[in-house]
Image (spheres, grey):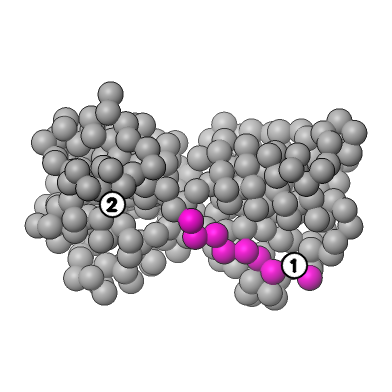
Amino acid sequence: DVEESEAGVRAALRESGLKEGRDYTVDVRNAQGDMATVNSLVDAAITEGADLLITLSTPTLQAALKRAAGKPIVFTYLANAVAAGAGRSDEDHLPNVVGVYNTAAYAEMLELIRQVRPDAHVLGTLFVPAEVNMVYHREQLNEAARKLNFKVVALAANTSADVADAALALTSQRIDVICQLPGNLTAAAFPSIAVAANKAKLPIFAFQSSQARYGAAVVLARDYGDAGREAGLLAARVMRGENPAKIPFIPYNKTKLVINTKAARHIGLTIPPALVKKAEEVISQ
């Protein structure tokens, strides 16, 4: 998902008429899923003379806000920039920050669960208390679930090593399906969640497109590539001299439906043919 976002940013910079190597250079710094190293990556970027930071995730934005000393920041691939500390609203925000955010499609996903598993009433999920984006996601899922008469069982995992045990504990909670919240740590450790779900014959419904390739039967993801493209266009505007303080944060709501029929078959789940036909991507083997 992060790679899709990055590709969208790069495509937009090219579309804007700016030429890499002539008008700008890009230095990609990857924490490889280790959030503890993000601060040092931001520090190194600033020390080496970065003029603008483009962040891909909530933790990277938070690190940049704390350590970038007023440098322009363009964010994407996060759920709530206000919760991350970038401002008070889409219009009232820190003067050096602008970007694109996309929260998950909770109500739409619960309707999909109802189509696929009309007998389901109890949803299970893992969340990471230290990730403000996941706490926000949990609140949003709970609110949507109350409106549609679902119950949510949410268990905490604090480190990647906790995820496997937390996933096994979750599957013992008499849940009907796993509806996994999007997050950084749970995305990195998602195979552990899939292993536990397969053992319990529970389907996974998820919000990050990459998770369809690792065992989620149904994924309703925001289009991270297109959201990244919107962020790249914002970056081009800032690079050309526009003031970030005068640009509102942009919500991005386009979704992408991915169905993994192989994962569904593995646990004996039948996905309605009409839903499979509706999907933008179907993984069958």
What's the distance in space between the residues labelled 1 and 2, CA to CA?
Answer: 35 Å
Q: Residues within 10 Å of mark 1 (few under 14, many from 20)?
A: some
Which numbered tag is attached to residue 247? 1
Say which residue label 2 marks: 179
Element type at marker 2?
strand
**Which of 167 and 234 lies nearest the eye of the viewer?**
234
Report the magenta residues as a range: 246-254
Q: Position of residue 192 (x, y in %)?
A: 31, 33
Tell me the kind of residue under disc 2: Cys
Q: Position of residue 113 (x, y in %)?
A: 22, 55
Q: Residue furthest top?
A: 285
Q: Residues within 10 Å of mark 2 (few under 14, many from 20)?
A: many
Q: Position of residue 188 (x, y in %)?
A: 44, 36
Left or right of 209 in this view: 48:
right
Residue 18 in the image: above or below residue 241? above
Q: Quadrant of the C terminus?
A: top left
Give the dominant element type of the magenta stretch: helix, strand or loop.
Answer: loop
Observer able to see residue 47: no
Tell me the kind of residue under disc 1: Ile
Q: Nearer the viewer, mark 1 or mark 2?
A: 1
Q: What residue appears at the point 36 percent right and 32 percent down from the top-left corner?
A: 213
Q: What residue appears at the point 84 percent right and 64 percent down from the top-left corner?
A: 243
Q: Position of residue 221 (x, y in %)?
A: 42, 49
User: Looking at the rendering, which quadrant does residue 150 occupy?
Assistant: bottom left
Observer able to see residue 26: yes
Residue 91 in the image: above or below residue 273? below
Left or right of 53 in this view: 192:
left
- Going from N to C along the chain, the mark reached first, 1 or 2, is 2
Residue 236 in the image: above or below residue 251? above
